[in-house]
Amino acid sequence: MRAIALVIIAVQFGLALPAVAESEVYPDRSISDVLPLFNRNHCERIRDPAEQLFCGDPELNAAAEKLNGATQERLNRIADRRLAIEENVLWIGDRNLSCGVFGQESVRFEDIEPVIACLLKETEERIAILRDPNFDCLAANTAAGALICSDPSLALAEMELNGHVLALIARLKENDAKDAFAEYARWTRERDRKCDLAGKDNAPLSELSSSEGCLAGYLSQKTVEMVAAKGDPTRVFGRHLPSPTPNADAVDLCVSQIHAANSCEDFLRVSRVFEIDSEVAEQSALVTAEIEMIVLSPFAVCSPVASSCTGTCWDLTSGKTKPSPASRDSFGVAHRLRIEKTFAFQNTDGRSWLCNSTALPPVDLGVALGRQ
């Protein structure tokens, strides 16, 4: 959990970015003329113009601390924290654009004070929004989220379930807790497929009403399971049970196990798994599926992370797979990647299917779609 919080803090302050000389960014005057904390906080190490202002201006620096606190408060009340990381990064990008900060382009010296004022206003508004419990519904960008937030009984049921889930995960060590959050996210994807909500994020509520009963049933069933665990998280998390059917749910479980083995959750979030085709025999099966992943932390397009966690190297220019291994490009946060792969399954006892695919490479097809 601490690792996830640090990801957000790192994104907020740009700590991983290389240094740029002060004179290169503001050639006319010294930054310390308007950024009193610049020298003390060693803000010259930060390359991102907006985050350099947060580092050096006292009001922005204090607001950033409050923002991190409000962000952590939100993390403490939701079960899929990686969604919050992604949403936070997207907000930072929108905040910068609205305040006239464009990528790595330096802010003109005469514009520093109005930009600081704008960033401060946006940040204070963000803090107030994050601390509003209704924000969790306002930020929901999935069909299930919209449906839950439109029905008070569903919203209360989800809140109760999340409370039980978070209480159980709090009893786990850090690495086990991270795996448990990923497992809960997989359950949610399975729920959306079962309730016919997958891929309907932009559908009007009137078209989703038929899924209400299924959604209510899922929330109730999972809550019963959490209560039955009697405070023991190992009774619900980390059991790695085989799948009853070789389908998208089985593929999702297989991908989750591959990602867990390679620590991919530090870099990617699986957002959707769709079944494309299947060939099922008595003892074996092949299931072809599309897996969509969203980047949570930058990594090189041709690297061990790219290979083990996405199944291939990538070319950002074309959006296709397999560039030169010498490529120095990296994926930015919120980049979407889609791959197609055929997974092999074995029937173990006539009722359970185990995934025989222990790695993502090779993939059948891949496309990089940029940010959402």
Image (spheres, rainbow, N blue to C red):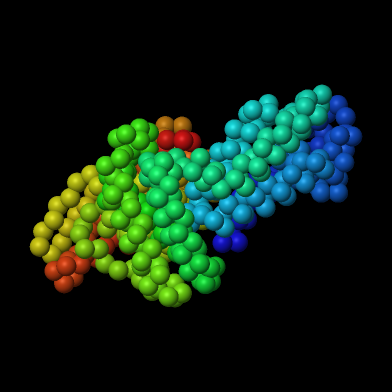
Residue 235 at x, y percent in the picture: 38, 74
* Position of residue 157 measured from the top left corner of the image (x, y, whole percent): 41, 55
Nearer to the camera, 269 or 369:
269
Placement of 324 over or under 4, stated as above or below: above
Answer yes or no: is residue 110 visible.
yes
Q: Residue at x 48, y 36 (%)?
A: 371
- Which quadrant would residue 217 be assigned to in this image? bottom left
Residue at 51% over, 54% down: 78
**166 is higher (above) or lower (below) than 153:** below
- The residue located at (31%, 39%) in the rendering is 208
Position of residue 225 relative to residue 130, above or below, is below
Q: Position of residue 269 (x, y in %)?
A: 45, 50
Question: Which of the 4 image quadrants contains residue 37?
Answer: top right
In-image side of 296 versus 96 (left or right): left
Is 296 situated left or right of 196 in this image?
right
Q: Is residue 293 visible?
A: no
Q: Is residue 346 left or right of residue 123?
A: left
Q: Residue at x 17, y 50 (%)?
A: 278
